[in-house]
Image (cartoon, rainbow, N blue to C red):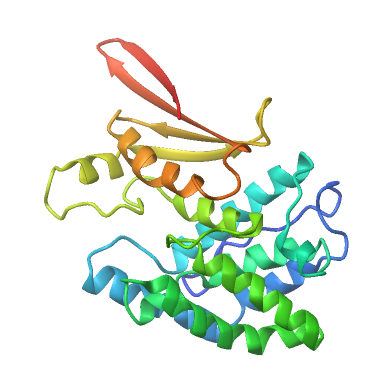
Amino acid sequence: MTKPADDTHVERHQYDPDADHSFPDGRVNAVLDRVTDDEEIATYLKAQNVNAVDRKGYNDHGTKHVGIVRDRALKLYDLLKARGVEFNGARQQGLDEADEAVIIALAATLHDVGHVVHRDRHSYYSIPLAADILDRLLPAFYEVPEQVRMKAEVLHAILCHHTEEETLTREAGVIRVADGLDMEQGRSRVPYEEGGRGINTVSSQAIESVILRPDDDVPAQVEIRMTNAAGVYQVDSLLKSKVDGSLLEDLIRIVAINTKSNGDESIVERIEL
């Protein structure tokens, strides 16, 4: 992964061509190269923050958020594929296995563009806007039949990331879960009250780090380190609800670790959700 030189670019996951679960044709990396250098997309990522942050008082839903979500979505996908988990979106459309990662990368990039219309129901507004962008991007990589099928899968994943719509593919489930993994201090998807000390405020400041790693019993473990037990509220009210209905429920373990000081002693509490 390379970090952007400025805020016009987002963090980019780079696949290891020597890893067994990666794709030697470099398809997803070619798409990521195009996406991260696209002026229209970069502008959307900045513009979509105006309604979310400036007008509604939410935390960042722009360039930084998209970079985090996309990187964690592809990392989660890597972990699942490494353990032989089968994805159904691309396969049921007759697309290549390599297209699974492309669907995830594109959906993660465009999932919040609907914020330029309104924060409320933004997933639905994202659909026509993302569709227009995909119509411009996909012809560089796919023939017409594959363009239609890729577009269908990307739009499904976008729609399901934040709504009550039923998640029908594991690619969409990865986007749904990854959206909830952007929760470090001050970045929670649950907004904190300005100037307040309510549970949203306290819990949103309690999350120190989010780490994705393999687990002995399931393909992926999400380890969330917090400095205050109030962070459990953030995890339970946000991430757990994202995992539910993602088609990944039995494949992910969520572990919250609370480290606090008691005088000269350090006390570690481990909570599994």
108 or 53: nearer the viewer? 108
89 or 253: nearer the viewer? 89
Asked whether residue 2 is in view, the answer is no
Asked whether residue 191 is in view, the answer is yes
Residue 40: x and y in percent read 53, 86
Residue 174: x and y in percent read 59, 53
Q: Quadrant of residue 1?
A: bottom right
Q: Quadrant of residue 37?
A: bottom right
Residue drawn at 67 percent across, 67 percent down: 103
Depicted 259 relative to depicted 153: above or below: above
Residue drawn at 59 percent across, 60 percent down: 172
Residue 213: x and y in percent read 62, 36
- In this figure, what is the number of numbered marks? 0
Asked whether, in this view, residue 114 is left or right of residue 198, the answer is right
Asked whether, in this view, residue 54 is left or right of residue 9, the answer is left
Residue drawn at 15 percent across, 55 percent down: 194
For the view shown, which residue lies furthest in the top direction?
Answer: 264
Residue 96: x and y in percent read 83, 66
Depicted 145 relative to depicted 19: above or below: below
Asked whether, in this view, residue 157 is left or right of residue 141, the answer is left
Depicted 38 relative to depicted 270: above or below: below
Residue drawn at 33 percent across, 41 percent down: 234
Depicted 235 relative to depicted 14: above or below: above
Of the 4 image quadrants, the one containing the C terminus is top left
45 or 271: nearer the viewer? 271
